[in-house]
């Protein structure tokens, strides 16, 4: 199967997980097409935008940073992430991510059901 970029759905959503601003999702596949997963998307956060602090249950979320820098909050504090970093948030863990830089923060997000 090949999915052409021009068929991928782009959605702008405000206050994701009670975060700030608007998050841009490019859904690489429709959720029902991804087995054992509930999200596979490219996410863009402009300056001042964030995905709010939230917990994962019976799933693991992966953020692979592909552009820019950001701040990830986890239970043990804030951490700076940059291009190439992989953030892993497992079952029972919580996190958030925000962009404080002028450059867009772009990441690939994948949630795998445990």
Image (cartoon, rainbow, N blue to C red):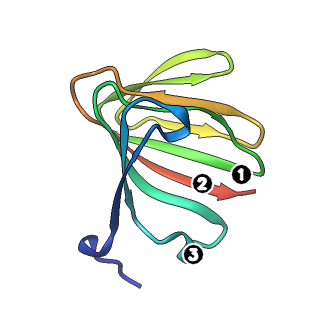
Q: CA distance from mark 1 to mark 3?
A: 16 Å
Q: Is residue 58 left or right of residue 109?
A: right
Mark 1 neighbour density, 10 Å: few (under 14) some (14–19) many (20 or more): some
Q: CA distance from mark 3 to mark 2?
A: 13 Å
* Marks 2,1: beta carbons within 8 A: yes
Q: Which of the 4 image quarters holds residue 8? A: bottom left
Q: CA distance from mark 2 to mark 1?
A: 7 Å
Mark 2 neighbour density, 10 Å: few (under 14) some (14–19) many (20 or more): many
Does 43 sit above or below residue 67? below
Does 72 sit above or below residue 109? above
In depth, the one of 59 and 66 nearer the eye is 59
Q: Which residue is mark 3?
A: 32
Q: Which residue is mark 1?
A: 59
Which comes before the other along the chain, label 2 or label 1? 1
Q: Secondary structure at mark 3?
A: helix
Identified at 42% across, 29% down, the residue is 20
Residue 111 circle label = 2
Does 48 sit above or below residue 83? above
Which dot, 1 or 3, sits closer to the camera?
A: 3
Q: Is residue 113 left or right of residue 39?
A: right
In depth, the one of 110 and 44 nearer the eye is 44
| Residue lying farthest to the top in this orientation | 77
Picture coordinates of residue 65 (x, y %)? 40, 39
Identified at 28% across, 27% down, the residue is 47
């Amino acid at each position: 199967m090949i999915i052409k970029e021009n068929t991928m759905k782009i959605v702008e959503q405000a206050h994701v997980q009670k975060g700030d601003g608007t998050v841009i999702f490019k859904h690489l596949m429709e959720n029902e097409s991804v087995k054992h997963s509930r999200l596979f998307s490219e996410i863009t956060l402009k300056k001042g935008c964030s995905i709010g602090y939230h917990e994962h249950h019976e799933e693991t979320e992966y953020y692979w940073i592909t552009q820019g820098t950001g701040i990830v909050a986890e239970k043990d504090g804030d951490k700076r992430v940059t291009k190439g970093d992989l953030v892993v948030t497992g079952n029972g863990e919580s996190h958030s991510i925000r962009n404080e830089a002028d450059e867009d923060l772009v990441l690939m997000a994948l949630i795998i059901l445990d």
